[in-house]
Amino acid sequence: MGTEPAESPEPAGRQQHDGPSLSPSRAGDFLTCPLLYRFRVIDRLPEPPSPVAARGTLVHAVLERLFDRAAPDRTPQAARELVLPEWERLQAAEPELASLFPDEQERAAWLEQAGEMLDRYFTLEDPRRLEPAHREMSVAALLSSGLQLRGYIDRLDVAPGGDIRIVDYKTGTAPPAEFEARALFQMRFYALVLWRAQGRVPRLLQLMYLGSGEIMRYQPDEADLRATERKVEALWQAIKRARASGDWRPRPGRICDWCAHKPICPAHGGTPPPLPADPAAEPAGDRAESAGDRAEPAVTG
């Protein structure tokens, strides 16, 4: 990817859509644990802020703002200088974040961890040599089945020759080999949306793990994206069956240690709330990506 961008593809903007929709985060929820999907999408249960999720949101915000600066000014020091003002901005938008830390010492240690992740970013690439086409790009595409796919891409790079690279920042650590396919599912999802919206297959999918300083790269092709589309459609049918039957069974695993709903999960002795009325209704789709989507337990990548 060169420093001079080619003509940038227009964002695959969200069309007005009243039918079912699915984001990669909520698709990932159902793959991980159908009950988690139910709690977040059907019951819409609130989730308290967590230091891990808030740190992910903060690091993403700093990296987005970093590219507002002229290329020579995108330095590790500049990123560090953005941490505190971006944290103050996030707290102003979500006052409940102020309750995350019992004292100034813990807050300072948490901010330093965010700074260390940003330092690690600069060991993976040099932002002075990049001019992203889009940041925090809203994307959406309507499949022939009537299901809308939607989400936000952290960064879209376009090379002078027109090749597209999708970049996603992760503040967790790179997953072990057995979880790589699930980690790449989100990226294939975004590639599918761009392909269906614009008719262009991204050249490269790039996951940057700032927790461990590693990069995972993958080159998709049309066959790959067609397979992803079939998987997404099958997943949506499974969600519809669960909604019709009311069978939102839990899938216990290491992810439970990060779940805000563990106390009411039957797999851990809890009792879920009653299902909302009309459980057989067509699921309208999931809610928007949230700050919680920045939390990345190592087991899932």
Image (cartoon, helix red, strand yellow):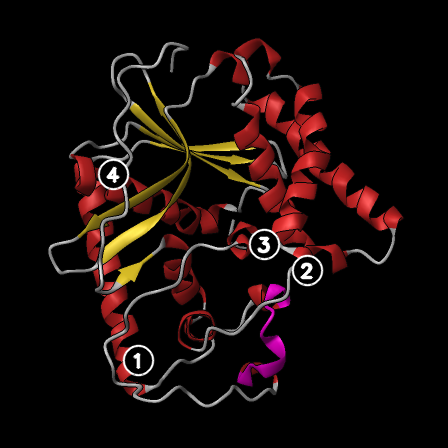
Instruction: Determine contact: label 3, label 2, CB under 8 Å.
Output: no
Type of residue at label 3? Pro
Q: Which is more foreground, mark 1 or mark 2?
A: 2
Give the mark, 4 or 1, whose residue is nearer the N terminus.
4
Q: Say what secondary structure mark 2 lies in.
A: helix
Task: Give above or below for 274 relative to 205.
Answer: below
Residue at image location 54% in from the left, 20% down from the top: 125
Q: Tell which of 33 and 111 is nearer to you.
A: 111
Looking at numbered disc 4 in the image, what kind of residue is underneath it? Leu
Nearer-N-terminus badge (1/3): 1
Report which residue position mark 2 lands on: 96
- Give the CA distance from mark 1 to mark 3: 27 Å
Closer mark to the observer between disc 3 and disc 4: 4
Q: Is residue 269 above or below residue 31?
A: below
Read off the residue under disc 1: 243
- In this view, 104 is above or below 27: above
Query: Is the residue 291 above or below the residue 127 in the image?
Result: below
Q: CA distance from mark 4 to mark 2?
A: 35 Å
Which residue in the structure is indicated by mark 4? 194
Of label 1 and label 2, which has the lower sequence position?
2
What amino acid type should be assigned to the residue bearing mark 1? Answer: Arg
